[in-house]
Amino acid sequence: MSDVLKKALADAIDTTRRNIPAFADRYPDDTTVNNWYPPRPARDGFPQGANEGWTTSFIPGCQWLAWEMTGDNAFRQAAQAHAKDFARRVHKGEGLATHDLGFLYTLSSVTPWRLTGSQEDKNAALAAADALMVRFLEPAGIIQAWGDLVDPAERGRTIIDSLMNMPLLTWASQQTGDQKYADAVRRHTAQLAQHIIRADNTTFHTFWWDPSTGEPLKGTTAQGYADDSCWARGQAWGIYGFALNYEATGNPDLLVAARRCADYFLAHLPADGVPFWDLVFNDGDDQPRDSSSAAIAACGLHQLASLETDPRLADRYRAAGQAMIEAVTAYSPQGEGVESDALLLHSVYNLNKNEGVDEGSLWGDYFYMEALVRHLNPRWKRYW
Ligand code: GLY
């Protein structure tokens, strides 16, 4: 099987190489249309192709992975050009009103700092961490996910995806020696472990706190099938995000949370191992898959296995992660024998809004490639 994974990684690297010119100074949209990325549309006052939204950093993320795997400087130069644009974005204050600064600046700026020691990228990432800290709400001790902090429609809400934004703050604490970032990670992740997982190990996509009293209020969904269902990608963010934050904080509740997310996810897969977009669906349902959830879960299970304190569980999660990445290679363009500039087909972005349904996605591409790199190169040092 490792030949299948090696071929899949070689295919992913080839596509990443072919995309360098098209993705150089004009960002593609979050998801493909009929398997091809259109330019990022003009929106929210930004022109077409601008560096806005939460997904643009997955392009340099793939390029850094490709550079590490090949040593080809074409990838490094392309990723460094993106890093410059991300530094411009944060220093100009463009599109920063989101918790997704962690997704954006971990891959675009912390990663080149880790791999090349660039001071400019370190400064950009620290500026992004400070912008993320503005969203830390007292007394709840959570980081607000979306929107303006004074918008009553968004105030006090966090989402499970936020777990993946915490590594930027953990890194900022390590670099500056300032505990405030690590304290925010500790409090935010403890709140999620307590409230965003239900008793049956499913997760809410979003959870609300009263912004003035800090009282936990209720869980709802934004991208899942229903408020009480289990959005597949949220559960996958939970596996990977709780595992990463367990390592960062040492809080054993986060290890338990990662296990609970993993156990439910693995118990609700269809026969081919790639989940439907919400885990309420399974074989026999006329619903699309979300391959990106499988790619994220493959990374998360690999991470969880490396931290697991129970050796039997470590073996179980390692084997499940391996099976998942093997299953998901069938959803690549090469696995299906179709032409595409995506690395992975069949993600669902937001079915409720009919956005990016059954398409390639920038995050699906990145986590697919990271999962292949992880499973083929046990010594690879993660970016998060
Ligand atoms: N973080 C947004 C998503 O997973 O769609």
Image: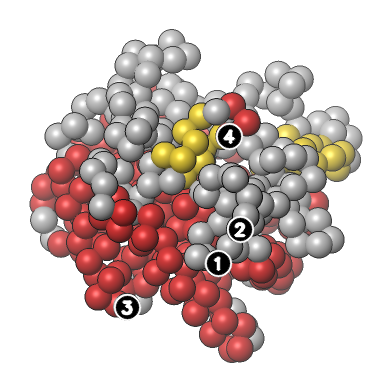
Give the residue displayed 47% in from the left and 52% down from the top. Answer: 291
Q: Residues within 10 Å of mark 1 (few under 14, many from 20)?
A: few
Quadrant for the C terminus, please: bottom left
Considering the numbered disc 3 on the image, is that residue within a helix, a strand or a loop? loop
Residue 346 visible from this viewpoint: yes
Provide residue 346's location: percent of width, then percent of height: 43, 46
Of circles 3 and 2, which is in front?
2
Q: CA distance from mark 1 to mark 4?
A: 22 Å
Quadrant of the image occupied by residue 80: top left
- Reply above or below: 228 against 351: below
Q: Residues within 10 Å of mark 2 (few under 14, many from 20)?
A: few
Q: CA distance from mark 1 to mark 2?
A: 7 Å
Q: Which residue is mark 3?
A: 1
Proximity of marks 1 and 2: CB atoms separated by less than 8 Å: yes
Colour setting: secondary structure
Q: Earlier in the sequence, mark 1 or mark 2?
A: 1
- Reply above or below: 96 against 4: above
In depth, the one of 133 and 177 nearer the eye is: 133
Q: Which residue is mark 1?
A: 271
In depth, the one of 99 and 171 nearer the eye is: 99
Q: Which residue is mark 2?
A: 283
Give the residue displayed 44% in from the left and 74% down from the top. Answer: 322
Q: Which residue is mark 4?
A: 351
Q: CA distance from mark 3 to mark 2?
A: 25 Å
Q: CA distance from mark 1 to mark 3?
A: 18 Å
| Residue 5, numbered circle | none
